[in-house]
Image (spheres, rainbow, N blue to C red):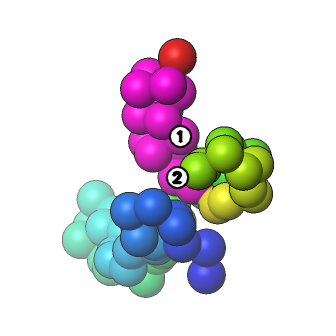
Amino acid sequence: MAKCQVCGKSGQFGHNVSHSKRRTNTRWLANIHRARLAQDGQVRGVRLCTRCLRTYHRVRG
């Protein structure tokens, strides 16, 4: 399962609940993207959730 290397966000488990209250299992996966970021003077490939990627660009740009 994909996991953000910054905040540790990963998938969650729960139920879809229909109008008749019938519950079926479902998973919500984190929106993980591969990105190349400069850290400590080196360009590294990391797996980030979109929230961390957005925060990184807001702080850096």
Q: Which of 43 and 53 lies nearest the eye of the viewer? A: 43
In reply to whether residue 54 is colored magenta, the answer given is yes
Residue at screen point 64% across, 61% down: 47
In reply to whether residue 55 is colored magenta, the answer given is yes
Magenta-tinted stretch: 48-60
For badge 1, the amino acid type reads Leu
Q: Which mark is residue 49?
A: 2
Along the horizontal axis of the image, is 38 left or right of 43? left
Residue at screen point 45% across, 45% down: 52
Q: Quadrant of residue 51?
A: top left
For badge 2, the amino acid type reads Cys
Residue at screen point 43% across, 82% down: 25
Q: Residues within 10 Å of mark 2 (few under 14, many from 20)?
A: many
Measured along the vertical axis of the image, is residue 43 above or below residue 24? above
Residue at screen point 59% across, 50% down: 40
Q: Give the spatial CA distance, label 1 vs label 2.
A: 6 Å
Along the horizontal axis of the image, is 33 left or right of 51? right
